Amino acid sequence: MKKIAVLLLVAVAMMIPAFASGSGESSGPVVLTLSEVHAEGYPTTLADYEFARLVEERTEGRIKIDVYSGGTLYGEETGSIEALQIGDLAFARVSASPVASYVPALNVIQLPYLYRDGDHMWQVLNGPVGQDMLNEIEASGSGLVGLCYYDAGARNFYTTKPVGSVADMAGLKIRLQNNPMMVEMVQLLGGNGVTGIGPNDVYSAIQQGTIDGAENNWPTYESMGDYQVAPYFVLDGHTRVPEILLASKAVLDTLDPADVEIIKECAKETQAYEIEQWALREESSEAKVTSEGVIVTELTPEQLQEFQDRMAPLYAKYGAGYEDLITEIQNTGL
Ligand code: BDP
């Protein structure tokens, strides 16, 4: 009888995050959860495990992080972000795109055609602008803490029929991340943005004809299998949206501040590892999908310019109040 009562108490305690993560008297490790939409082996998932490994090692086993990959906990990143806000979840590796709904300043670092290339983006993110943005996540009162950025390359449109110019985008239903700026981006190109579909459900939405395509980087396009149903990939490179490893402020507040520092340090250390894994996967994913029949469209400088020109209203609307910051970003590395 006594044993059952104790077991019940433990079970109840584990359902309350603050209780489970309190330092208190208990001798066992604090077990925290990390949500990831990508599959095992994907660069961000590898980085999640590396983060978990480092944290367990540096806290000498006081903190253990369980990684749930493949969107098994939250299929949509918006769900995981909201769980972080209320302390139902400790960590989520998400794209910066949906986070902008909670921390609007983040739209500035993902405006279309903001960066010349990946190196430019990393100079910005690893410089004062990127670090200020991470601090802004915590300072905004969103209940979120931005731990570090990861690479996610450039995003491109992929569709069930060829797109070689802005005119070809007319009327296409394109799945987007949950971010109103991205919906407007597609509208400005003449298409219709569709949100509310998790990345693991894009394949079936295309297959069923709910949407005509989506947009993403090579590894996601390959990993989710979307290339099999939307084989036209146009190299328009409209955005570079970094990934962010987020923590729940409510959960971090229950931990020993020294352990929170260790967590922040470990996250930063995993960035280089993810970037390395990213470069490998970007290349192998591109090679895989092109060898399996994907039709890649390259745009002429004039065609690309047309995509870029359509984005001016986004700079006016989402860049309002951030004009100097945008200029600073654009001038970085010049
Ligand atoms: C991928 C990101 C992932 C996003 C996904 C999406 O790695 O975090 O959830 O795009 O489009 O590139 O939803």
Image (cartoon, rainbow, N blue to C red):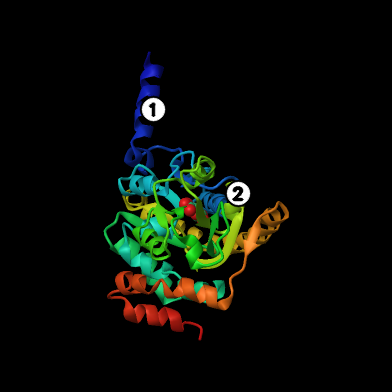
Specify the quadrant of the image occupied by residue 25: top left
- Disc 2 marks which residue? 223
Decide which of tag 2 and tag 1 comes sooner along the chain.
Answer: 1
Question: Which residue is at 40% across, 74% downward?
Answer: 129
Q: Residue 254 in the image: state x and y as whole percent.
A: 33, 48
Question: Which residue is at 32% across, 41% downward?
Answer: 18
* Any part of residue 261 in sight: no
Q: Residue 40 in the image: state x and y as whole percent.
A: 59, 45
Which secondary structure, mark 2? Answer: helix
Residue 190 left/right relative to 217: left
Q: Which residue in the rendered view is the most extreme toward the top?
A: 1
State whether residue 64 is above or below residue 107. above
Name which residue type carries label 1: Ala
Residue 182 left/right relative to 54: left
- Disc 1 marks which residue? 11
Specify the quadrant of the image occupied by residue 261: bottom left
Which secondary structure, mark 1? Answer: helix
Q: Residue 135 in the image: state x and y as whole percent.
A: 35, 66
Residue 323 left/right relative to 204: left
In this rendering, the label closer to the viewer, 2 or 1: 2
Question: The N terminus appears in which quarter of the rendering?
Answer: top left
